[in-house]
Amino acid sequence: MASRAVQDQLKIKFRLADGSDIGPKLFPMATSVTALKESVLAELPKGNDDGPKTTKDVKLICSGRILKNHQTVADCQSRLCGVPGGATTMHVIIRPASARGMDFF
């Protein structure tokens, strides 16, 4: 039964622009991309006034695709994610404070 619970989750590591990582952490397959972004925001170092304020300031990229907020972990899982015991890496892109009013992000 425990192995079934693990199969219903995906181990995800978030790679930041400076090369550091958050995680890996296990997320249920039903977890939304918005919830993943909230998890990243909660784990980012504090004290940076230019840091992201909301999930709109964060983009997640997995397997070369920008993930949409309405997608779930199950939607994002690719054939490459099937490595037993391995973690899926999602790249984190933070919108610069100077670009927060612009729509190109």
Image (cartoon, rainbow, N blue to C red):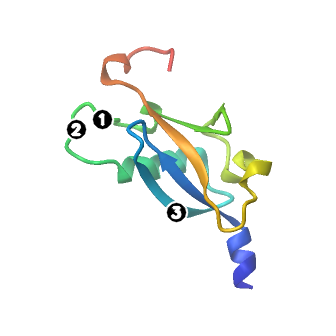
Q: CA distance from mark 3 to mark 1?
A: 22 Å
Q: Write down the residue under mark 2.
A: 48
The residue at the point 61 percent across, 58 percent down is 87
Position in image of residue 97 (x %, y %): 31, 24
Question: Neighbour class for label 3 at 10 Å: few (<14), some, many (≥20)?
Answer: some
Relative to 20, residue 50 above or below: above
Q: Amino acid at mark 2?
A: Asn
Q: Is residue 17 left or right of residue 53?
A: right
Position in image of residue 32 (x %, y %): 61, 49
Q: Write down the residue under mark 1.
A: 51
Q: Which mark is residue 24?
A: none
The residue at the point 73 percent across, 79 percent down is 3
Between disc 3 and disc 2, whose residue precedes?
Answer: 3
Among the 4 quarters of the image, the one containing residue 61 = top right
Front residue of 21 and 53: 21
The residue at the point 72 percent across, 54 percent down is 81
Q: Write down the residue under mark 3.
A: 25
Q: CA distance from mark 3 to mark 2?
A: 24 Å
The quarter of the image holding the N terminus is bottom right
Q: Amino acid at mark 1?
A: Gly
Q: Are marks 2 and 1 in contact (CB under 8 Å)?
A: yes
Position in image of residue 55 (x %, y %): 45, 38
Q: Is residue 77 left or right of residue 13?
A: right
Q: Secondary structure at mark 2?
A: loop
Q: Secondary structure at mark 1?
A: loop
